[in-house]
Structure formats: structure tokens, C-alpha cells
Amino acid sequence: MKKKNLRRIFSVFSAAALSVGAAAMFAGCTTDRPEVTVTYTFLGKDYNVDYTLSRKSKPQTVQHFIELADAGYYDGLCVHDYNNEITALYAGGYYYDEEGELTEKNYFEAVKKLEEEKNIKFTQSVFMSDEARTPLYTVYGEFSDNGSTVEGSSFSHTQGALVMYYTDKENFNGRVTTIRNDAGKDNNGEQYQDNCLYRYNSATSLFYTFTGSGTGYSERAAKYAVFGMAKDYENQLEKGLLKAIADYTEDLEGEDQFTEERTLTINKNEPFALVQNANTKATYKVPVEPITIKTVKVTKY
């Protein structure tokens, strides 16, 4: 065999070895339990809330959240719904607070702009059911009502749960194509599933932390992806964000003065015209004193 051919074979072998090595190194940089820190600002003071995520049970949701966090998507948004009575949660990731008014961030426009201007490539798991499989930039709903059968360690919808949320699509039955990544599929990144309900695969950037003390809302885990858990929830009650809110509300005549109800038209930027034009309303309990999401930082991949 000629030396030139030997060199070519050696070069190909070396490149393949390097590729495998790089993949192994990248795999070694990720864990089943990534961690993030959300820094909230309230009354001029910052409060860190640390969360552990479950990549094993909610791989696509976790990937989606981490990519948004790394892109700085959440920075400057606010907690737009603080409910300590009925659903017991605080939700954010979709609105700015601008002098007391909620201004919606156009998620679909924002993520495409990030890809164009910052050369970011978001992982896709939901597509239009067209020949081109046009990506929708939403995330596959990893919960049982959507047929997800992910096995492995996961978090329950209990106090401190971090949940990926989606807005109400009413009775819209539009269908999409998804890529599943669970125990029911031998996922190879090309495993498409057609005829899936968009309303179950429409989560964008909305998330909430469950603050209830009971299990009365555990059925929500069937409808929404519980993908993380606050690491030290008791600390939030004793000296963190929730303690600061509790101290502040003590000086008010009633806790209902901490928030004010606002009814907004939602889904104005959805990719389906029927959803856009449905004039769907949502009522939020908006904190009078803004709670801002200063940053979301991944501390462990």
C-alpha cells in the first residue's frame, strides 16, 4: 500500500477518533441533574433561588430551558402572576413590567432574532405538519396527558416544583409533528411523531414555581412538565424571596393588596391564526411591587 494511502487512512482514523473523543468529552460535561440559579429582584434586593433539573425524565424540556437561559432570554422579565391562595404559584418568563404595565415579549420573534444575531441554534422538537417540517420553537410536552412515557428519576408536583407552562388554547385541535425523546421511542434525534395536539406541545418560555403546601394540585403533573425542584425551599421561606414577600405583606392591610388582578388578551403572537384570533383572555394576579427575573444562570450542566 502506498504511503499516501496510508496517510489518508490514518488521517480519517484520527479524525474519527477525535470526533468520538469530543463527543465523549461533551457527554461527560452533562449530568442527569443540571442546576440553575434564578435571581429575582424585589424592592431593590436580589434573591437567588437554586433549582435542580431532571434531564433524565424531561430531557427536551430541560434542554429548552437551559438554551433559553444561556441565551439570556429571561433576563429582565418579571413574575406576572403571584397566587398564594388558589393555585399557589409564582409564574414568569413572558412579560416585562414597564411602569406597572405588563408588556408581552414576543417569544417567537425573540428566539428567531437570537438565532440570527447571536448565532444561537435552538434544539427543535415541535414542527408544522408540512412537507418542510417547519420548526415552531415550542417544546414537546413531556407529561402523561400528551402520551409521554419517560421513565427514570423525576420530580413530583409538590412544594418547590419548577414547571414548564403553556397558555390556554381553548378547544383548538390543530395538529403538529413532534420528536419524542422518552422510553417509548428509541430516540436517535430523527424520531418524528405526527398528528400531535399543538396545545400540548406549545410551551414557549413560561414557567412557574409551585408554592402550595398540599398535594391538591398533583394532577397538574399530568398536564404540565415538572422538570425541576427548588434545592432549598425552606430557605426561601425563612430568609429568601418568599420570606421577603411575607414580611412585606405583613405591613399591608391584607395580602390581596400585594397583587392586583389584570385580564389580558393572550396568544397574540401564536403561529396558528385560529389561536391568534380567538381573543382568549387570562386573568393574572400581578404583584404591585414588581418581582423581576434578573438572570437565569446554569451552574451545572
Image (tube, rainbow, N blue to C red):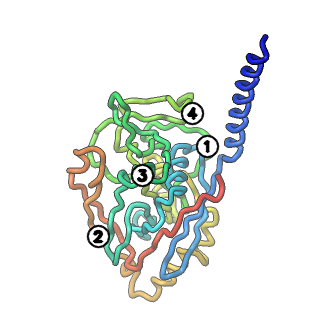
Where does label 4 land, which residue? 183
Q: Is residue 7 above or below residue 205?
A: above
Where does label 2 land, which residue? 262
The answer for how far apart the CA atoms under marks 4 and 1 are is 10 Å
* Dot label at residue 125: none
Viewer-side label of 2, 3: 3
Which of the 4 image quadrants contains residue 146? top left
**Which residue: 29% across, 53% down?**
269
What is the residue that sits farthest to the top in this orientation?
1
Residue 139: percent from left, percent from top: 44, 45
Q: Is residue 126 above or below residue 39?
A: above
Q: Earlier in the sequence, mark 4 or mark 1?
A: 1
Residue 53: percent from left, percent from top: 59, 53
Q: Residues within 10 Å of mark 3 (few under 14, many from 20)?
A: some
Viewer-side label of 3, 1: 3
Viewer-side label of 4, 3: 3
Q: Earlier in the sequence, mark 4 or mark 3?
A: 3
Count numbered badges in the picture.
Answer: 4
* Dot label at residue 111: 3
Q: Amino acid at mark 3?
A: Val
Q: Amino acid at mark 1?
A: Lys
Q: Earlier in the sequence, mark 2 or mark 3?
A: 3
Secondary structure of residue under mark 1: loop
Secondary structure of residue under mark 2: strand
